[in-house]
Amino acid sequence: CRPVLPVAMLAAGRSRWLRRSLSVRAVAEDVWSGTQCASKNRAKTLRTKQKGMDILNDPLWNKGMAFSVSERDRLHLRGLLPPRVKSIEAQQERIMRLLRAEPDPIKKNLQLQDLHSRNETLYHRILVEHTEELAPLIYTPTVGHVCQQFGAQFSRSRGMYFSSDDRGEFSTMVFNWPHDDVHVICVTDGSRILGLGDLGAHGMGIPIGKLALYAAAGGIAPHRVMPVVLDVGTNNQALLDDPDYVGVRERRLEGAEYYDMVDEFMEAVFERWPQVVVQFEDFETSKAIPLLAKYRHRYRCFNDDIQGTGATVLAGVLGALRLQRRPPEDIRSLRVAVVGAGSAGIGVAQALHMAMQQAGLSAKAAYSNFYILDQDGLQSKARFSSLTEEQMAFARADLPDGMALEEVVEQAKPHLVLGLSGKRGTISEAAIRKMAAAVERPIVMPLSNPTSSCEITPEEAYEWSDGRAIVATGSPFEPVALADGSLKTPSQCNNMYIFPGIGLGASICQSETIPDSMLYESAVALSRVTDEEEMARGSVFPSISKIRQCSHAVAVACIRHAHDLGIAKASPGCDHNRGETYEQWVTRKMYYPEYAPIYTSHTR
């Protein structure tokens, strides 16, 4: 039995009486236990002041042809819709049929955007039911193309834009958002969108896609999320010259002006929504690291590129050890080459470094397992004047600065190579062949998005390692047929396995902050979801079709850890549900898109 939050949709948050109507009874059994619930929660009737065409034109209320005959009378819809009444299941079938008939993923994305603008309940329902098929269309790899075409295809505003022209007004602007109960904000400044660079305000496609996954994968109701762009300008001259560019036509703010603007934003959103979780997304490294350091102990926030990517990779590495029938503690003996020294690369290294310490290594010994490379080669202590404090912690003192990856592999013999450079071809054939000659099961994880930026393809990794590599990639790839006729399935090491569960767990328990140790516990929980059948195919991550199960496991781990640390402000058993477990609490809180009965208080 799936938990149902009766959101018909999602005009809740517009007023106190409507929010109260969203409360539901606890679901008796854990949704992932495999048992059947004794009964399914009935969606509570929702009240609106709208009627007639106003309802049909509001995607939060609109059900299309699924309005019942009695609703059509109550809401003054009779005659405004064709007479046939369709179920949500029939609507899903029609939408999926149309999507599958379109071969172009960009046009499929546009179809989904159109549905999102017409009927939010149906949009999120098909994402929940068809996550594996549709995630690549609303997230990587398609979302990169969507951002590049954002201005040309712009038709309806979604989310909020805080621009440099609005400084001094943020604290009042936030009240323009119609919902009072925002749980998660995903914010970008557009400075480093995937591997595409500075896309300015056109980076809004990323928060929109991420938050759609929060609803589908993480079970957070769509009216409780808010996509945001901090429009500080752009240094992309092509965009400044583009007549369709939607953002501020100025060069990017820098220095104190930039950080003052982010300060104003953080103060404004936490003043309006004190319980919100803020996820930083696709900020360039020079901004991402100091922003995280500044806010992580003051606000309920995390950086997905640094912490989310690190936790996801850690889960993949733990999964690779499981696949080899090795205990998790063996992570302390792994030698790791990281190709890419930006915020994501350093964030991954920090996550693995923490895991090595958890396995018994000292901090110093754990640092000695890492080899960080940027565009100039291996980073060494000789570059102390140009490296950040975080990079210096991993810089080598025992090897020459600037060594190429092939030289590092020959000398260090790493067990794991990570690609976070955003550039195709930065993990070479020579490097993989040298690695495979020294290591029985090399772990190869090219994580850059979109697909065109992937450092090495799975086919190349398998071929150059004679089929022995354990491969996980940032974007989805098809299974690879090896020379011996066997089929290998590369895992998708995607942050969508982690960030929805972190946001869900932190918002449910109202964790004061999101410490790195919470990310570590999330990774451990995720690594346990992969089953034996999936590992037999060479996968170290579970199927995307199990994404809600993954989010549930991650959220439970976050909540349990927050209570262990004493930083959780909320506990299970509220709302008259005494004795419920963490698992049951998360199940009860997870949103499932379902139409609810509606009546109108509007009088003629």
Image (cartoon, grey):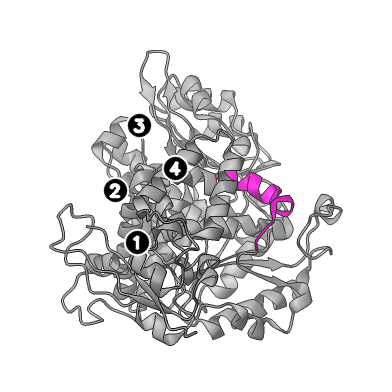
Q: Which residue lies furthest to the front in this view?
A: 79
Discs 1/3, front: 1
Mark on residue 96?
4
Q: Report crowding for label 3: few under 14, some 14 to 19, many 20 or more residues within 10 A (C-alpha).
A: many
Q: What stretch is highlighted in magenta?
A: 140-156
- How far from the left and from the top, in percent, is residue 421? 62, 43
Q: Alpha-carbon distance for marks 1 and 2?
A: 21 Å
Marks counted in the figure total 4
Residue found 61% across the figure and 64% down from its top: 158
Tag shown at residue 538: 3
Contact? badges 1 and 3 (CB < 8 Å): no
Residues at marks 1 and 3, CA–CA distance in whole angstroms? 32 Å
Task: State the SS at label 4.
Answer: helix
Mark positioned earlier in the residue sequence (4 or 1): 4
Q: Which amino acid does label 3 sit on?
A: Gly
Amino acid tagged 1: Tyr
Q: Name the residue under label 1.
A: 592
Q: Residues within 10 Å of mark 2 (few under 14, many from 20)?
A: many
- Residue 547 seen from this side: no
**In terms of sequence position, does the residue under pointer 1 or pointer 2 come before the other?**
2
Q: Nearer the viewer, mark 4 or mark 3?
A: 4
Q: Mark 2 points at which residue?
A: 529
Which quadrant of the figure has residue 587?
Answer: bottom left
Give the CA distance from mark 3 to mark 2. Answer: 15 Å
Against 237, residue 571 (above or below) is below
Magenta span: helix, strand or loop, mainly? helix
User: What kind of element bears circle 2?
Assistant: loop
**Residue 326 colored magenta?**
no
Q: Do the residues labelled 2 and 4 touch (CB within 8 Å)?
A: no
Residue occupying image coordinates x 17% and y 63%: 29
Residue under the image location 38 percent in, 13 percent down: 484
